[in-house]
Amino acid sequence: RITDDTDGGRLVEEWTTAVVGGAVLPHAVDASKLRAGHTYTLTELTAPDGYTRAEQVQFQIAADGTVTRVGTAGSVSGTTVTMTDDHTRISLQKTGVGGAALSGAGFSLYHSDASGATGAQIGSEGLTFDKLVPNQYYKLVETTVPAGYVAMEPLAFRFLYNQSTGATSLTYAARTDIAVTAANGQATVTVNDAPTTVSVRKVNENGDALAGAVLSIHADNAGSVGAEIAG
């Protein structure tokens, strides 16, 4: 939609973009609807599924017909004003003991449903997934786990995004290993993995617990005792 800011927000034209062969066709506005010396605002009312609604783009038409951008949103080339939509997106961060960042993790995203079933995989393993559709169900699985840590339980969630307000959220069953921050169609999920652990119990020949034993665990060094592993 284009409105004339100089003329009190008068509606100039409203349309739905056309797509042919996967490409969005430019929309031409009749010059008779535009006035030299006026400032206009281009507004996206609804973004396609998988995209966020773009920031408004302002432009001005000079007396000689030159078109210039007002502000920083969008772009202008000649008489063509371009508005660019970003993707809806979910990004993953991995933490371990004490909240320290962990590298080496990989996740896979799948289509799902309200029951949490695993459907078709979306793309390939990674840390960022684009073009999530609002109100759809997904399942996130940790498919590559950093050494010394346990993989997270798969996360089944619903992606919510309100284009009018920018409000964004993931809905899922309550759990303590997941933290989510979200806004404007994009969400960051922080996954806190538990470390792998070994519990040792000292017993006598009858299987009774013995107190007072002091034990240590060491890394294997080609069959020899290596460095001690802190417990």
Image (cartoon, grey):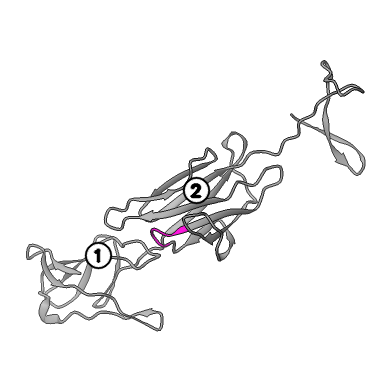
Above or below 103: residue 211: above
Q: Amino acid at mark 1?
A: Leu
Q: Which residue position is annotated with label 1?
A: 45
Q: Please name whichever residue, 131 or 13, is drawn nearer the observer in this view of the structure.
A: 131
The quarter of the rendered structure image containing the N terminus is bottom left
Specify whether residue 136 is painted magenta. yes
Q: Spatial distance from mark 1 to mark 2, Cα to Cα?
A: 28 Å
Disc number for residue 189: 2
- Residue occupying the point 49% across, 48% down: 189
Between disc 1 and disc 2, whose residue precedes? 1
Q: Amino acid at mark 2?
A: Val
Find residue 52 and report its horizontal and vertical position in percent.
35, 61
- Residue occupying the point 59% across, 38% down: 100
- Residue occupying the point 85% across, 20% down: 208
- Say which element carries label 1: loop
Find residue 67 and report its horizontal and vertical position in percent.
20, 73
Whether residue 182 sits left or right of residue 93 in the image: it is: left
- Say which element carries label 2: strand
Whether residue 211 sits left or right of residue 140 in the image: it is: right
Find residue 61 and report its horizontal and vertical position in percent.
16, 72
* Residue at the extreme top: 212
User: Quadrant of the rendered structure where residue 213 is?
Assistant: top right
Specify whether residue 193 is painted magenta. no
- Residue occupying the point 38% across, 80% down: 23
Magenta region, residue range: 133-137
Number of labels in the image equals 2
* Residue at the extreme bottom: 21
Query: Is residue 69 visible to us here?
Result: yes
Q: Please name whichever residue, 75 or 221, is drawn nearer the observer in this view of the structure.
A: 221
Whether residue 45 sits left or right of residue 152 in the image: it is: left
